[in-house]
Amino acid sequence: METAGDLIMLALAGAVAGAVNAIAGGGRILTLAGMMALGIDPRIANLTSTVALSPGQIVAGAMAWKGVRHRPRLAAHLGGSVALAIAVATIAGACGALLLLATDSAGFRGIVVWLVLAATTIYAWAGRSTQSIRGSKPLARRLFWPVITILGIYGGYFGGGNSFLVLALLAASGLAGAEGGAVKNIVVAAVNAGAVVVFVGSGSTQWHLAIPLAVGGVLGSMAGARLFGRLRASQIRPIVIASGLFLAGWLAFR
């Protein structure tokens, strides 16, 4: 049974994760660490965290969409259709969620340490990779759709570091800087929306944990969306990387 202090800690973790997701991504690592510190099964913690953070990510995505200029120009970068890119991301997120539900708790516990390490590695790699991708030749449109589908499935299944992979895809498609970051928030929100529909329908969500995380996540996402462009990802990246390495080590030796 979680205490009031535990629930307050989850709300604070959700606020920090929501802000981190809106600015740079990687918040899932923080909430997963917080829930597992309370003894929650990793698989349940993962899907509950997805549900809890989705309202904040939808808020960040909506605020990003409202602030995006030259929307017709985005279609040229997003495979020709913004709406279709969002639809594909949503469906792929739902497929990833179904894969997670098909994975038993013991199986997920066995691979979660590698997922956390992969997410942390992606996070650490993302800064320099996005910079190098910006100046490269734009990604062929025929490659955009399979890549965004794979990222959507991964996002629905686990999602750690997925923001950076989406950001790299957008940079490779010609969207970088603040515009790429804003569209990243929109795509990630769509992926999570698809996953949430599946998770809520499964009845596996731990609502007494999800609600404080969600409240904190929405407030943090609103703050992060307002700070977007003022803070650099490099300013918070070391904290998330350290958290990911600590969580991976704890999972490996517990």
Image (spheres, rainbow, N blue to C red):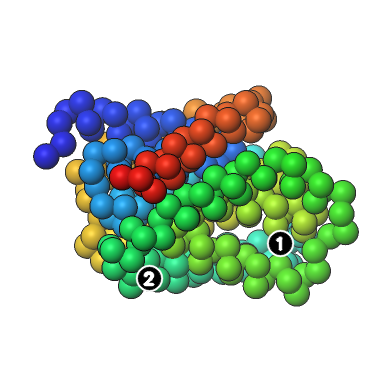
Can I make out residue 209 in this image? yes
Q: Between disc 2 and disc 1, whose residue precedes?
A: 1
Picture quadrant of residue 74 = bottom right
Identity, as a three-letter code, of the amino acid under mark 2: Leu
Residue at left offset 24%, top offset 39%: 38
The residue beneath circle 2 is: 98
Can I make out residue 70 in this image? no
Mark 2 closeness class: few <14, some 14–19, many ≥20 residues within 10 Å: some
Residue at left offset 31%, top offset 52%: 42
Q: Quadrant of the N terminus?
A: top left
Q: Position of residue 83 (x, y in %)?
A: 61, 64
Mark 1 closeness class: few <14, some 14–19, many ≥20 residues within 10 Å: many
49 or 217, which lies in front? 49
Residue at left offset 19%, top offset 43%: 208
155 or 110, which lies in front? 110
Q: Is residue 78 left or right of residue 101?
A: right
Q: Position of residue 197 (x, y in %)?
A: 36, 63
Q: Which residue is at the far left?
A: 1
Q: Is residue 83 above or below residue 3?
A: below
Mark 1 lies on a secondary structure that is loop
Identity, as a three-letter code, of the amino acid under mark 1: Leu
Q: Is residue 109 left or right of residue 118?
A: left
Q: Quadrant of the C terminus?
A: top left
Q: Is residue 59 left or right of residue 207?
A: right
Q: Is residue 108 above or below residue 125?
A: below
Mark number for residue 78?
A: 1
Residue at left offset 51%, top offset 62%: 154
Q: Position of residue 144 (x, y in %)?
A: 71, 67
65 or 248, which lies in front? 248
Q: Is residue 106 above or below residue 34?
A: below
Q: Is residue 64 left or right of residue 100?
A: right
Mark number for residue 228?
A: none
